Amino acid sequence: MTQELQGSNSTTDAPRGADAFGQVGNPTHKALPAMQLPSEAPRSRPREVWDRFRRNKLAMLCFVIVAIYLLVGMCSFSPLFDRKINDSLAESYEPPAWRSPDGHIEPQRWLGLDIQGRSVLWRALYGTRIALLITIITSIIAISIGVILGIVAGYFGGWLDDIIIWLYSTVSSIPWLLLVIALAYVIQSNDSPGFFLRHERLQAIFGGVTTVILAMGLTDWVGLCRLIRGEVIKLRDRDFVAAARAMGLGNGPILFRHILPNTTHLIIITFSLGAVGYVQVEVVLAFLGLGITDKPSWGRMIDDAKLELLRGVWWQATVATAMIFVLCLALNMLGDFLRDALDPRLRGVDS
Amino acid sequence: MAQPLLELQDLCVAFDTERGQIHPVRDVCLSVYPGQTVALVGESGCGKSVTALSILRLIPQPPGRIHSGKIMFKGRDLLALSEKQMQHVRGKDIAMIFQEPMTSLNPVYTIGDQIVEAVTLHQGVGTRQAYQIAAESLHAVGIADPLRRLREYPHQLSGGMRQRVMIAMALSCQPKLLIADEPTTALDVTIQAQILELLSKLQRQRNMSVLLITHDLGVVAENADVVAVMYASRIVEFAGVEELFDNPFHPYTQGLLRSVPRLGAKEGRLATIPGTVPNPARFPAGCKFHPRCPVTRQAAASAPADRTIQVRTGEETFPVLRTCAVEEPLLRQVADGHWVACSQVDTYAAAPTSLPVLQHRRQVNAAFVDPQHEGQPVAQELGK
């Protein structure tokens, strides 16, 4: 194109000054592209959030770590794991070693053997299954309760709001750990009304996990309830809600189709950060003998380790703690990055 | 013209607040005939939006309630309907568009999803067909490439386009009456003109009535057939648009028209109506306009003392006619198709104001700007 322009001007004038791009020629001769609007795929909100998230290397690292845990957790449902955690390879403790006594490289010895000679590696990996079950199902329970109560309180106001505020204020005034422990005892003991919660089928699927899940799930909804309530109070006065009502929608559709999707950012962040708490409380419950007793979980490994440490056996405690630490760290940072990525103020072009 | 499509009969709306009961709408009588555009004009705080919302019963009921009166729509009293029946009326028979297009759409759904929601709610068609209808309605409001736009999110559109989408949503179910609550106040002037032209085109096509709520007299002059002027919760003047601009009777209307700036006028200062709109919690007695009314002040200056009463506003104290300060005037017919609520209306002639800027319609240069398709750049002209 530069050639053309120079060709048309060369006979008459001295070359004009270069334009901003350093090209000589009359800029107005450049033909305007005809009606060619740049085509871009419409960027949906989730897509936008994902793109923003992806640019942050650390956030992606945390995401990958959590994804690995998830993957391992899902694999751990296979019968292979059930076998491996019970395989006794030696008489008793063995420190971490690269090779077995025969000289083969055995991955299962890399993290040592526990008191019964079982592979700490396999037990730690199995622990992700427990952690996965706990975090996901407890979150589902707690989030469901919190969201429903929060929405109802925020949208309808009045006496319903008052009751729900009273409810969550009461529950949150009790130290959560004590509440969870008390509820766990109730669910676990044979002659309390909570016995019905220990249904046999549930026991078969989840083991002692049911107690832990229910105890935590039924008590941890308070934070989310408060957040959702505040958000719904803001949202119910927004113009699009008024427009939806003017269009003839009833309260139900407005609440669940219009208001609820606008609170998902809170739910996602709460899920990420809540998981951290659940994993750690499970450790506490294990110390108290509540919760999972038959299958290995990280909490149980740490609980067993407290006596072992006196005898110089450090590997079980270290491994379990490390697994918890890395997961919680990744989830915490993920929660922060998600909060940044989902921040509505950083959205593209908006009012 | 047979029956009015919408008729407000002595509508009173009350709000219960800690400071007592306030009445943002009192004794409002209004009628809208099929195919007509009725403009409801007034300053901020005069009660026009509350009137519009109460037609659709969108006033939040705990603090607010319809105190008395009837809203007859096609012969049915809307106030007697249950909430369920009212939901059938909203959107289907009467639709409403709001002032702020930027926030009137749900940010987490696409435009298509939202229009389809309106369509499937009232027309009971399948989703696929609903998307077709949505695309057609986007095309009808002048949005280019409707199929692509259906998949876009609200934050990807400009204000003018969002308002067009709102209009498309409102019109997708073929309502008989469209209530437009200051539809162009939040938009720039050029877009304002396009949107209003679009509205009047659609109105003519569908023989739809429009209740246009605005504070802009220019908009009223260009688009309305009938004008109702509201002040402090009541209608003070009601007339056809040409009659109103030619012969405004009420002092408030005259003040409004005088304060419109004129091209080529040589006055140093903009004429204003002194004083401010009264607080609904503390309305003055009698005619609500009397503290600001020049007519009553002038009449009191030359009236005997027993017919006047002292009124104090802020710093000054001045006499006004006793009738104005004590009795609230009702709407009376002063000419054919012209009602005024003023007790002194017989004593003065209407002050005609000729405002050249309002007398001619906007000329649209169709060769340069095609209001049909928003977004066509001027380059298209040069390319020809």
Image (cartoon, grey):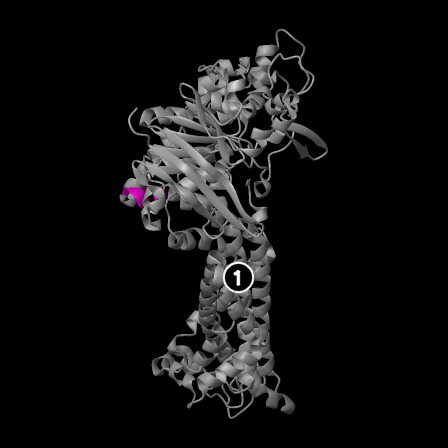
Give coordinates of residue A272: x percent, y percent.
Answer: 53, 64
Q: What's the amino acid at mark 1?
A: Val
List x then y, in percent, for residue A70: 47, 67
Q: Using the rendered view, name the quadrant where residue A74 is placed.
A: bottom left
**Position of residue A289 measured from the top left corner of the image (x, y, whole percent):** 52, 87
Q: Which residues are magenta?
A: B116-123
Q: Chief secondary structure of the magenta span?
A: helix
**Above/below status of A240 relative to A126:** above
Q: Is residue B322 magenta?
A: no
**SS for tag 1?**
helix
Q: Is residue B138 left or right of residue B310?
A: left
* Quarter of the image with the N terminus of chain A in it: top right
* Identity of the residue drawn at 60% across and 34% down: B277
Q: Which of B339/B117 is in front?
A: B339
Q: Which residue is mark 1?
A: A64
Check the picture and name the quadrant holding the C terminus of chain A.
Answer: top right
Does residue B17 show up? yes
Which residue occupies the foreground of this view, B293 or B190? B293
Which of the two residues, A202 or A56, is positioned nearer the viewer here?
Answer: A202
- Vertical order, A129 against A316 (above or below): above
Residue B120 is one of the magenta-drawn residues: yes
Residue B153 visible, this orientation? no
Count the marks.
1
Q: How many residues crowd mark 1 within 10 Å: few (<14), some (14–19), many (20+)?
A: few
The chain containing the residue under callout 1 comes to A
